[in-house]
Image (spheres, helix red, strand yellow):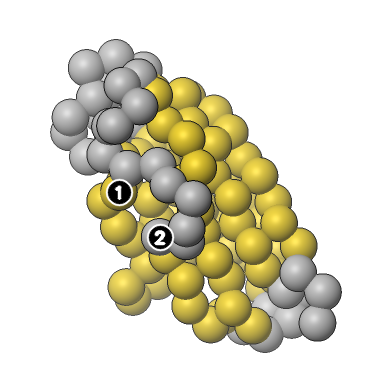
Amino acid sequence: MPITTDTFSGTVNVGSQDIHTFTVSQNGEVDVTLTSAAPPSTIVMGVGVGVPNGSACTFVAGGSVQTAAGSTSQIYGIVSSGTYCVEVYDVGNATSSVTYSVNVAHP
């Protein structure tokens, strides 16, 4: 089964979030990796996966973490085909806007 990797980037303002949608073509594993977030480069951000709900992203059970950027998946799980969203958000420790990049690998 071919794997697609969507890379999303953006900026999260203090106390805010940024949401991107993606489409899963068939049942399979989704892997989400926050690959960069700064300043500072060690900042812990919230990352979640869910289903779009208007202008929000409603996380699936177990579909969110607080993490610093890294090179390995921070969220993974099996999903059905459909439209999903990934959200990067401030968990309360940003003192200025944070620029980030997140990869979503899915079938």
Check the image and report above or below for 35 versus 79: above
Which one is in front, 12 or 29?
29
Residue most toward the front? 71
* Badge 1 density bin: few <14, some 14–19, many ≥20, Cα 10 Å: some
Give the mark nearest the N terminus, 1 or 2.
1
Q: Residue at x 60, y 57 (%)?
A: 104
- The CA span between labels 1 and 2 is 7 Å
The residue wearing badge 2 is: 74
Quadrant of image for the C terminus: bottom right
Q: Is residue 92 left or right of residue 86?
A: left
Check the image and report above or below for 25 versus 42: below
Q: Residue at x 57, y 71 (%)?
A: 30
Residue most toward the left? 92
Q: Is residue 68 left or right of residue 6?
A: left
The answer to whether mark 1 and mark 2 are in CB contact below 8 A is yes
Q: Quadrant of residue 31?
A: bottom right
Q: Residue at x 59, y 78 (%)?
A: 29
* Residue 95 is at least partly visible in this image: yes
Which one is in front, 88 or 40?
40
Give how far across and how far down residue 9 sits, in percent: 58, 33
Amino acid type for the residue under numbered disc 1: Thr
Quadrant of image for the N terminus: bottom right
Q: Residue 40 bears which disc, if any?
A: none
Which one is in front, 44 or 64?
44
Q: Element type at marker 2?
A: loop
Residue most toward the top? 96
Q: Element type at marker 1?
A: strand
Give how far across and how far down residue 6 sits, in percent: 69, 51
Give how far across and how far down residue 34 sits, in percent: 46, 46
The residue wearing badge 1 is: 67
* Badge 2 density bin: few <14, some 14–19, many ≥20, Cα 10 Å: many
